[in-house]
Image: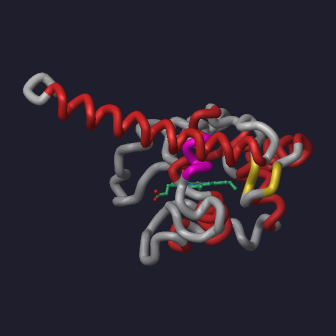
Amino acid sequence: MSKTHPAKGSEERKAACLLAAATLAVASASGAAAGSPAEVTFLGAPSSAETIAAGEVLYAEHCAACHGENREGQPDWRRRLDTGRMPAPPQDGSGHSFTHSDAHLFAMTKSGIEAVVPGYESDMPAFGDILEDGEIIAILSFVKANWPEAKRIFQAGLPGMDTGMSGQ
Ligand code: HEC
């Protein structure tokens, strides 16, 4: 790619590397502030081992039927169904959950995808009448605890993770 403009290419690469390093530094710094980058937080608060364990039970009860016992998602989850709606994506870090801020994950679970994408039609139920807020936080803490650490670090750097606002 840089063969025709070696100097320019390497400058660009350097800039991209510096940017990536800066982004990672910010991400791991915010992780470190909460204890260690491996520590799981939800909406800025550390998730305890008890919360994560409770979330595992609730996940099996309320989410596994669609998102998979091992959070692997529905088969062929990237392909739209005949109904025009999307299958349930994985929650194990191989889908796109980690590209959504905590506030959005919470809103989508509590009020449905429509809460974040107005007018969107989806098979994802709204759990606001079924689960307490704390139960939703426990489930999503469990889900996040089982993402590969790199996905948690990526998510920690999303816009809206510090303010609880925006950031899909
Ligand atoms: C009846 C099936 C069903 C159940 C049960 C279900 N989901 Fe979903 N969920 C879906 C579908 C289908 C989508 C994809 C929606 C779309 O893109 O249209 C989805 C999408 C999502 C998303 C947004 C996409 C993503 O991965 O970021 C989140 C977050 C989510 N579900 C969390 C949960 C949680 C947490 C539970 C349990 C409390 C749960 N879901 C239970 C079907 C379900």
Whether residue 45 is visible to the viewer of this picture, yes or no, is yes
Coloration mode = secondary structure
Where are the magenta residues, as a range?
A: 152-157
What x and y, as percent, mark residue 123?
A: 51, 61
Residue 124, picture quadrant = bottom right
Residue at the far bottom in the pictured view: 119
Residue lying at 59% horizontally and 46% vertically, measured from the top left: 26
Q: Does 115 sit above or below residue 52?
A: below
Residue lying at 69% horizontally and 35% vertically, measured from the top left: 146
Q: Quadrant of ligand 1?
A: bottom right
User: Position of 119 compared to 156: left or right?
Assistant: left
The one nearer the camera, 67 or 20, is 20
Q: Considering the image in quadrants, where does the N terminus appear?
A: top left
Total marks drawn?
0
Residue at the far left in the pictured view: 4
What x and y, as percent, mark residue 50?
A: 91, 44
Residue lying at 82% horizontally and 67% vertically, measured from the top left: 132
User: Position of 5 compared to 120: left or right?
Assistant: left
User: Position of 71 compared to 85: left or right?
Assistant: right
What x and y, as percent, mark residue 99?
A: 51, 50
Q: Main secondary structure of the magenta part?
A: helix
Q: Is residue 36 magenta?
A: no
Residue lying at 75% horizontally and 73% vertically, measured from the top left: 129
The one nearer the camera, 98 or 7, is 7
Whether residue 125 is visible to the viewer of this picture, yes or no, is no
User: Position of 163 compared to 139: left or right?
Assistant: left
The one nearer the camera, 142 or 78, is 142
What x and y, as percent, mark residue 65?
A: 64, 45
